[in-house]
Image (tube, rainbow, N blue to C red):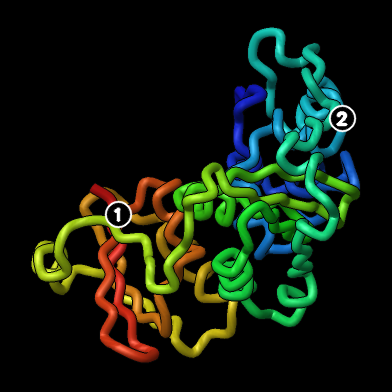
Amino acid sequence: MIPIDANTKIATLINQHPDALEAIVGLSPHFKKLRNPILRKLMASRTTIDTACRVGKIPLRLFFERLAPLGFVASGTESTREVPGAEPRPLPEVVRSLHPEKVVDLDVRPILGSGLDPLERILQEVRKLPAGHVLKVINSFEPAPLILLLKRQGFEAHAVHRDADTVETYFFRSSEAVRIPKSELPVQGGSWAEVENRFGASMTRIDVRGMEMPQPMFAILDAIDGLEAGKALFVQHKRVPVFLLPELEERGIEYVLNDRGEGDVQMILYRN
């Protein structure tokens, strides 16, 4: 038997049993996006059972009952607890009080559908967002990495799940003094030379320069899934993968960057 509770991640369930994915998808139309390996990689590692039940508008009890035949058992009183606060949170006052002309809509679903990464387009809209305006990103899932990235830049976010295929995420400044310089990039870790010398020839290497977006991000995430403490992954990329960096931090991965010019970025990813 595999003990689980409301805080268990969806990725843990899927990794523990081969039939867990279809069992979860069958609970709600909201979960069918998990069949998409790209969206599953983004969502499953960040979403708990509790959060999934809120999104799918189903009681925890039903979720645990569906997984029980696969050997999962709810700990304590989890099997009878309903989902608290399942009603959607109201829009923040800063958004509700805005005139519609001050809400900038950006539907990134066509961009993702064409196999491209919408991050640069989103950041372009953020940089030119006038004071007192709100950016509404329309997607088919809640963009957790983007929320983390913009939070570090002084933005708050509020997601509204309209239906199984439409999520509207509102981004608004915590302070009107916040701006995102075009050249600003997240940095972390020590010096390149120090980390390169530390791991030397023992690094696993991956070259994602020939891949179409968003495949580089998921190839890197696949490569670090089994990365052990004291090991490193050397990545060759065409650009600094800004959208990936919050995911690395979330997974406890340290990194250093070596931007060698147009189309040539090197990264070393490692666990301490």
> In the picture, residue 34 is in which quadrant?
bottom right
Is residue 40 depicted above or below 52 in this figure?
A: below
Q: Position of residue 236 (x, y in %)?
A: 35, 80
Residue that appears at 77% across and 32% down: 67
Q: Is residue 214 left or right of residue 64?
A: left
As drawn, the residue found furthest toward the top would be 77
Q: Position of residue 120 (x, y in %)?
A: 56, 74
The type of residue carrying mark 1 is: Glu
**Mark 1: few/some/many CA within 10 Å (<14, 14-19, 20+):** some
Is residue 71 depicted above or below 178 in this figure?
A: above
Labelled pair 2, 1 in contact (Cβ < 8 Å): no
The type of residue carrying mark 2 is: Ile
Per the image, the residue denoted by label 1 is: 254
Q: Secondary structure at mark 2?
A: loop
Which numbered tag is attached to residue 58? 2
Instruction: Please tell me which residue lies in front, 80 or 110.
Output: 110
Give the CA distance from mark 2 to mark 1: 37 Å
Residue that appears at 69% across and 55% down: 133
Q: Secondary structure at mark 1?
A: strand
Q: Is residue 258 left or right of residue 122?
A: left
Q: Position of residue 115 (x, y in %)?
A: 69, 80
Instruction: Please tell me which residue lies in front, 196 or 224.
Output: 196
Query: Which of disc 1 and disc 2 is earlier in sequence?
Result: 2
**Mark 2: few/some/many CA within 10 Å (<14, 14-19, 20+):** some
Residue that appears at 52% across and 44% down: 175
**Viewer can see residue 35:** no
Q: Is residue 84 left or right of residue 41?
A: right
Instruction: Please tell me which residue lies in front, 254 or 234.
Output: 254
**Viewer can see residue 97:** yes
Q: Position of residue 90 (x, y in %)?
A: 81, 32
Residue that appears at 71% across and 8% down: 77
Q: Is residue 103 left or right of residue 240?
A: right
